[in-house]
Amino acid sequence: MSFTIEERGKPNTLDYRVFFRNTEGKYVSPFHDIPIYADEAQNIFHAVVEVPRWTNAKMEIATKDPLNPLKQDIKKGNLRYVANVFPHKGYIWNYGAIPQTWEDPGHKDADTGCCGDNDPIDICDIGYKVLHYNFIEWRKLKVLGTLALIDEGETDWKVIVINMEDPEANNFNTGYLEATFEWFKKYKVPDGKPENQFAFNGEFKDRDFALKTVKETHEFWKALISKKTNAGELNCTNTCVTDSPFCCSTTDAKAVVMP
C-alpha cells in the first residue's frame, strides 16, 4: 500500500493544502480512508506525518474539511508556528497521527478524568530519518509508550513510536522520553501561555498501555464513521469505507480537490 500527495497553494499560506491519492488514483482522506493497521496481528500501524522534524509550521489533518487534507493550523486569522525552545529547533520528532483513530470529546477517560480532544491520536516518531509531508507506511512499528497531555482540560495522547527498520530501533525501549516531556511541557510558554499539564504526574505509560489506548480510539472512530456518534463539526467524507454513510463517489471526491 502506498499513497501520493498533491499540493494546492503555496506552503506557509492560508490556502495551502496537501491532498492524498491511493495507487488507484482515487482521492482519499488521511483521517478515514488509510487503514489503521499494516498488520493487525503484529500491531503494525500506518501513520500520517503532519510535521517533519526540525520544522516549525503547525501542520495538521484538517478534520473539518472534506477529504481532510493537511493544512497549517490557524488561530485568530494567523498561521500557527511552534517556537524554538532551547536547545530544540521546531518539532523534535516527525510528528503525526494514526488514521482511523479518534479521541472522542464525549468520552471521559477513566484514567485521566478528561474527555478526548476531537482529533486522531498523535504520534511522535523518534527515528533518525527526517521525513517530509507524506504518508508513511511503517512495516515494523515499535510503540514505546504514551504520554497523556492535558490540553485545556482535554486528553491529548502522545504515542511515542519508532520504525523497526530504523538502525537504532533495537536500542530504544523507552527512549527520548525526557526530551519529549520537556518539549510538550514548555512549547507554548514563548507564546505567553503557562506550562502544559499532564495526567499521571507526567509519567509515561508503557507499550501495552499505549496499544490499548490506540485500539480504544479506533473503536471510537468506528462509531464516528458509521454515524453512531454525532460527528459535530468533523467532516467524515471518505471514498473507501464502503459501509459508511459518509462514503462518496470518486467524482464527488475529485470535485473537492478540483472544484
Image (cartoon, rainbow, N blue to C red):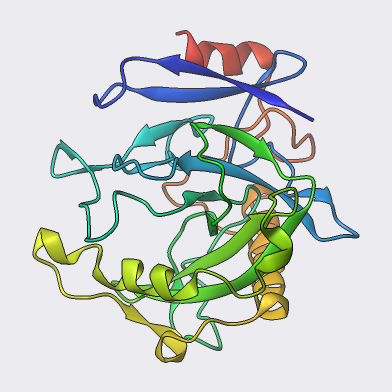
Marks counted in the figure total 0
Looking at the image, residue 198 lies above or below residue 23: below
Looking at the image, residue 215 lies above or below residue 10: below
- Is residue 19 found left or right of 23 in the rendered image? left
The image position of residue 130, as x and y in percent, is 50, 40
Give the quarter of the figure containing the N terminus.
top right
**Residue 228 in view in this figure:** no
Closer to us: 137 or 258: 137
Looking at the image, residue 220 lies above or below residue 9: below
The image position of residue 198, as x and y in percent, is 38, 82
Give the quarter of the figure containing the C terminus.
top left
* Residue visible at 29% across and 43% down in the picture: 56
Q: Quadrant of residue 11?
A: top left
* Residue visible at 61% across and 34% down in the picture: 135
Q: Which residue lies most toward the left here?
A: 192
* Residue visible at 41% across and 47% down in the picture: 233
**Residue 161 in view in this figure:** yes
The image position of residue 164, as x and y in percent, is 74, 54
Looking at the image, residue 58 lies above or below residue 202: above
The image position of residue 94, as x and y in percent, is 49, 47
* Residue visible at 63% across and 46% down in the picture: 47
- Is residue 139 found left or right of 19 in the rendered image? right
Closer to us: 45 or 29: 45
